[in-house]
């Protein structure tokens, strides 16, 4: 059967009414969970996984995939409007999205975020459809040394993400790396820095850390000032001009959108790195390469476009090893593998030979869900933006209750709420002293990967793993990315 025939079969199967209904229901639930702070894609999938048992494979998988694919779209809206990330990856969006909302340009930021998400999701789906038949040997080239260096490249963004001086960025990132060392060491199983607390044996959890660092300081600011998020009620009218400009912004910055989307695909292909890393690495890359780097953190639209396009494109990349090799490309894909088993399917090379039409159907699901969810959220944005005009003394207690409920719902632990307030205090201190909280989060998220894959590489290859051709190539690219901009600036100063 030719490739065109396989694609036609997949498209015909995708266009069934039950598949379309499953996508619409899953997309609506995904956006709902995304609007609730702390309820990430993994939690949503875990809650909904039992529902697919007994369903036909394509509607069941399309339902779960559409939930997971669009959940961060809802999170980006709350990040922009309230400074409360709906999920950890949305924390990168609020760095510039929240300042835009305070300037009365929330509609612009939301439209840009949703447009970038849709474009990134479509690029991720296209990459998935193109790479599935050809990427198997390439995935096997990415061993532990290559993964270590790619994670190290993400850590190199610490100085870029640092607010103010490079020194403060490195200090914040170093603190994140230290926090990642709490709990069991990944390769040896030895507990560290747990201080006799069973809670700390598994380390700090991402949701309380990110929610505390970003949401609590913003809610404290709202409560203390008592003012609305925006400067006036102009945003409540949702000016058409702002929406149109926001939708077109990723197209005006098309090179950034394309570059960050492809970066998200690459990060998604590498098992274990995850969505938090993709959004922050894309943000750091955008800041490093932008001629307006000084505007980042103050309301640069590039700071909204970059993480949103990378975050949604990452899902297409994460499906590549999941479908082609049976290796989950992210934590959410672990639960998708569980859904495959519930439906009597086993992803891997044999799956692509016998069920390529199903893989094509999932590719189309990814693209359609991202586009439709962006349209749906734009339609819902007006009442959401009008909420931001409420006085802070009214809004802060309600948002605080929602945030804490979301944090508790993830693991059902009151200790998570205590940790949220602990990191909220740290976030307030860092905000006052001018330290970048994003750098701390990136160090925390990538710390586990750097340590784990460095240990595995040493055990498997010795120090010589640094001399492998692929690691040398990645290392040279890493050095070039870190130093090209300072070198150019030095040359310009000499002239």
Image (tube, rainbow, N blue to C red):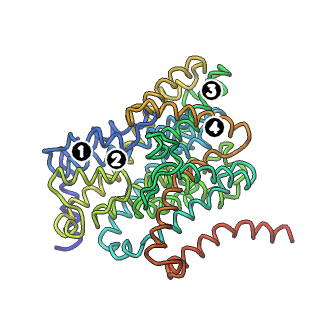
The reply to whether residue 213 is visible in this rendering is yes
Q: Secondary structure at mark 4?
A: helix
Q: Residue 105 location in percent, x, y?
A: 61, 36
- Quarter of the view holding residue 406: top left
The image shows residue 258, relative to residue 343, as above or below, that is below
Q: Is residue 383 left or right of residue 482?
A: left
What numbered label is drawn on residue 220?
Answer: 3
Q: Nearer the viewer, mark 4 or mark 1?
A: 4
Q: Are marks 3 and 1 in contact (CB under 8 Å)?
A: no
Q: For marks 3 and 4, give the CA distance.
A: 13 Å
Q: Is residue 323 left or right of residue 306?
A: left
Q: Tell which circle, 3 or 4, labels the residue nearer the N-terminal end.
A: 3
Q: Residue 161 location in percent, x, y?
A: 64, 52
Q: Residue at x 51, y 31 (%)?
A: 418
Q: Are marks 2 and 3 in contact (CB under 8 Å)?
A: no
Q: For marks 2 and 4, give the CA distance.
A: 37 Å
Q: Residue 164 versus residue 453: which sits nearer the camera?
A: 453
Instruction: Tell me the residue that label 4 is attached to.
Output: 426
Q: Nearer the viewer, mark 3 or mark 1?
A: 3
């Amino acid at each position: 059967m030719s490739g065109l025939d396989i694609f036609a079969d997949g498209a015909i199967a995708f266009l069934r009414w039950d598949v379309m209904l499953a996508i619409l229901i899953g997309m609506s639930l995904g956006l709902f969970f995304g609007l609730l702070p702390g309820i990430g894609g993994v939690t949503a999938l875990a809650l909904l996984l039992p529902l697919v048992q007994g369903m036909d494979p394509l509607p069941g998988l399309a339902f779960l995939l559409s939930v997971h694919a669009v959940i961060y779209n809802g999170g980006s809206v709350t990040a922009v409007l309230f400074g409360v990330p709906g999920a950890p990856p949305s924390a990168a969006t609020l760095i510039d999205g929240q300042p835009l909302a305070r300037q009365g340009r929330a509609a612009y930021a939301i439209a840009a975020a949703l447009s970038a998400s849709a474009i990134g999701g479509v690029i991720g789906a296209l990459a998935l459809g193109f790479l599935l038949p050809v990427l198997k040997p390439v995935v096997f080239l990415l061993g532990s040394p290559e993964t270590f260096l790619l994670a190290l490249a993400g850590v190199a963004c610490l100085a870029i993400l640092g607010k103010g001086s490079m020194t403060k960025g490195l200090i914040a990132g170093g603190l994140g790396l230290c926090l990642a060392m709490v709990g069991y060491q990944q390769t040896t199983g030895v507990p560290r820095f747990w201080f006799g607390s069973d809670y700390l044996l598994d380390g700090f959890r991402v949701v309380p850390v990110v929610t505390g660092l970003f949401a609590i300081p913003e809610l404290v600011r709202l409560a203390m000032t008592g003012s609305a998020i925006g400067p006036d009620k102009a945003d409540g009218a949702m000016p058409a001009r702002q929406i149109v400009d926001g939708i077109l912004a990723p197209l005006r910055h098309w090179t950034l959108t394309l570059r960050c989307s492809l970066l998200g695909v690459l990060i998604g292909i590498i098992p274990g790195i995850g969505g938090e890393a993709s959004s922050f690495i894309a943000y750091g890359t955008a800041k490093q390469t932008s001629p307006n780097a000084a505007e980042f953190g103050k309301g640069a639209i590039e700071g909204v476009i970059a993480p949103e396009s990378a975050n949604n494109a990452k899902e297409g990349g994460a499906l590549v090893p999941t479908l082609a090799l049976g290796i989950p490309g992210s934590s959410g894909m672990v639960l998708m593998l569980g859904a495959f088993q519930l439906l009597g399917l086993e992803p891997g090379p044999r799956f692509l030979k016998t069920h390529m039409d199903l893989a094509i159907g999932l590719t189309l699901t990814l693209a359609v869900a991202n586009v439709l969810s962006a349209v749906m959220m734009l339609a819902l944005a007006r009442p959401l933006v009008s909420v931001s005009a409420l006085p802070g003394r009214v809004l802060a207690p309600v948002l605080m209750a929602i945030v804490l409920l979301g944090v508790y719902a993830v693991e059902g632990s009151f200790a998570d709420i205590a940790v949220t307030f602990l990191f909220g205090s740290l976030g307030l201190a860092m905000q006052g002293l001018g330290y970048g909280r994003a750098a701390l989060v990136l160090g925390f998220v990538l710390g586990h990967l750097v340590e784990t894959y460095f240990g595995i590489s040493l055990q498997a290859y010795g120090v010589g793993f640094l001399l492998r051709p692929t690691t040398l190539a990645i290392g040279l690219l890493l050095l070039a990315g870190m130093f090209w901009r300072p070198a150019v600036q030095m040359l310009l100063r000499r002239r």
